[in-house]
Amino acid sequence: MSADRSFAGDATRALAGQLIARRSVTPEDAGCLEIIASRLTAIGFACEFINRGGVTNLWARRGEQRPLVCFAGHTDVVPSGPLEQWDSDPFVPVERDGLLYGRGAADMKSSLAAFVTASEAFVADHPRHHGSLAFLLTSDEEGDAIDGTVVVIDTLRRRGESIDYCVVGEPTAVDTLGDMVKNGRRGSLSGKLAIHGIQGHIAYPHLAKNPIHLAAPAIAELATTVWDEGNEFFPPTTWQVSNIHAGTGAGNVIPGSVVIDFNFRFGTASRPQDLQERLCTLLARHGLDYHIDWTLAARPFLTGRGALIDAALRAIRAETGCEPELSTSGGTSDGRFIAEICPQVLEIGPVNASIHKVNECVEVAALPRLAAIYRRILEELLPADV
């Protein structure tokens, strides 16, 4: 093992800047994966592009033996928003006061750069390392996520391939690098609920049936229902309304229906089919004429204590001095797809305070430390030259 841990300082900063400069607004990759594939090919990776629907996906692997350690992430970014609110061009990487600014700086081009430089340094020191190392990268995470990571996972499953350990580069830290990592995520179950009434003149309510009035008591009960108590790893399930649509636009017409968009965020204490059944039972008890279109966007996943978490915690302590908190908070990530063929998935990345915001940024000094964390994980999971 190299004694010099500063190996990735300028290299990680330079590659992060190169990636930020690519206008890879979802689902565009804008050449980011070509840059990464070129670097990986140079150190012995076999690179395979598995593209679909205008989305660019890269599966790169070095080695054929188990265990297989995978770095996963995305090159696509959200739109910049109003350019006049940025202090500098969001697609021109700029360093100010120790921070690197640009769209994707935190979510998640710095992580991608650290993945690459960590792998380059690891392979240089361990050219005949034990096991295998892989990258699974996509340009469809911030968008619909239907032609991205899930496509690669489906391809690997059909080929009978699996992953032993996966580190996703999502920005997980709260105040300082290493203070939080994600060892799971909640599931997401959405519904589009249509409640039917009878349209009529607002001056003759006895001849109509107002679906908004009919829905109101049910919505109030749904909002106060305790769906579960959560558990050691996940908070209690929540139910939230996101949109309500009704009316013709006229001020004198009782609408014939109301459409309510809602979402459950749930952990392993509840199954999606149980949530669906309980909600429908409640609506039936209120005597509503309704229809629901359901969308299960994500199932919850959880990685318990094991080799990956132990290696990550030791790496973070060594590089930052932090005692990391394991958390399942936040939204969904592509870890939900990877968990289908990988028993241990962990998300480790930079501070997330600026993600999706104007003037997104990452601490420059954190970049070599992030790369060093990733490298230490590789050294522990793929420890011996053969």
Image (cartoon, rainbow, N blue to C red):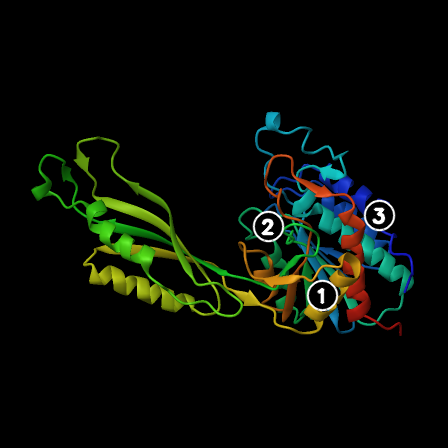
Residue 141 badge: 2
Q: Provide the residue designation for mark 1.
A: 313
Residue at 10% of width from left, 40% of height from top? 205
Q: Secondary structure at mark 1?
A: helix
Q: Is residue 29 left or right of residue 195?
A: right
Q: Residues within 10 Å of mark 1 (few under 14, many from 20)?
A: some
Between the residue at mark 3 and the residue at mark 1, the CA separation in whole angstroms equals: 22 Å
Specify the amino acid type for callout 3.
Gly
Horizontal side of residue 356 vs 384, given as left or right: left
Quarter of the image with the N terminus in it:
bottom right
Closer to us: 286 or 136: 286
Q: Secondary structure under badge 3?
A: helix
Residue under the image location 71 percent in, 70 percent down = 310
Out of 1 and 56, give the one closest to the viewer.
1
Specify the quadrant of the image occupied by residue 24: top right
Name the residue that disc number 3 marks. Answer: 9
Residue 135's quadrant in the figure?
bottom right
Residue at left offset 75%, top offset 73% = 67
Q: CA distance from mark 2 to mark 3?
A: 27 Å
Mark found first going from the N terminus, 1 or 2? 2
Q: Is residue 353 above or below residue 250?
A: below
Callout 2: 10 Å neighbours few (<14), some, many (20+)?
A: many
> Depth-wise, is mark 2 or mark 3 nearer the camera?
3
In the rendered structure, which amino acid carries the disc numbered 2?
Glu
Q: Position of residue 166 (x, y in %)?
A: 68, 64
Task: Name the residue type under label 1.
Answer: Leu
Q: Is residue 342 visible?
A: no
Quadrant hosting residue 251:
top left
